[in-house]
Image (spheres, helix red, strand yellow):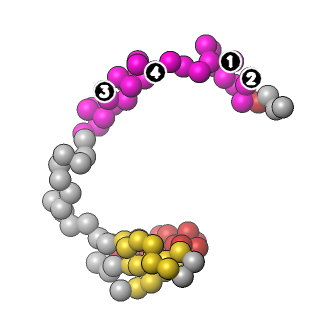
């Protein structure tokens, strides 16, 4: 198993993902200690209950938005507040 530091992963993400895509497992280290393992996913390995189709996910987002209260009354107020510095 290949070992890659978190910094190296940040700088060479594409290269590391290509290796994982070719079937290689990669150990990610942070400050010299094992942190995570990247492994390739085989087709059908993820449970269908873990992933939602687009329409279902979007309906859930809309439902959440309807039940939440916006922080600002208008988009102009939101822009004004984000640009305002103390």
Quadrant location, the N terminus: bottom left
Q: Label 2: which residue?
A: 80
Magenta region, mostly helix, strand or loop?
Answer: helix
* Local SS, label 2: helix
Asked if the residue under mark 2 is in contact with the one under mark 1, i.e. CB atoms within 8 Å, the reply is: yes
Q: CA distance from mark 2 to mark 3?
A: 30 Å
Check disc 1: other Cα within 10 Å, few if <14, some if 14-19, many if 20+.
few
Number of labels in the image equals: 4
Query: In this rendering, which labeled residue sits more in front, label 4 or label 1?
Result: 4
Question: Going from the N terminus, do you reach mark 2 or mark 4 first?
Answer: 4
Stretch of the chain drawn in magenta: 53-82
Residue 13 in view of the camera: yes
For the C terminus, give its image quadrant: top right
- Residue bearing the label numbered 3: 59
Q: Residues within 10 Å of mark 3 (few under 14, many from 20)?
A: few
Task: Tell me where residue 58 appears, x and y as whole percent.
Answer: 33, 31
Whole-number angstrom distance, CA of label 1 to CA of label 3: 27 Å
Q: Position of residue 14 (x, y in %)?
A: 47, 70
Residue 40 picture location, percent across and down? 29, 70
């Amino acid at each position: 198993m290949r070992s890659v530091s978190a910094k190296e992963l940040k700088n060479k993400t594409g290269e590391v993902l290509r290796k994982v895509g070719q079937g290689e497992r990669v150990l990610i280290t942070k400050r010299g200690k094992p942190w995570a393992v990247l492994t390739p996913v085989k087709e059908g390995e993820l449970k269908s209950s873990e992933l939602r189709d687009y329409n279902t996910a979007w309906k859930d987002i809309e439902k959440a938005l309807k039940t939440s209260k916006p922080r600002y009354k208008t988009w102009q107020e939101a822009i004004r507040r984000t640009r305002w510095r103390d």
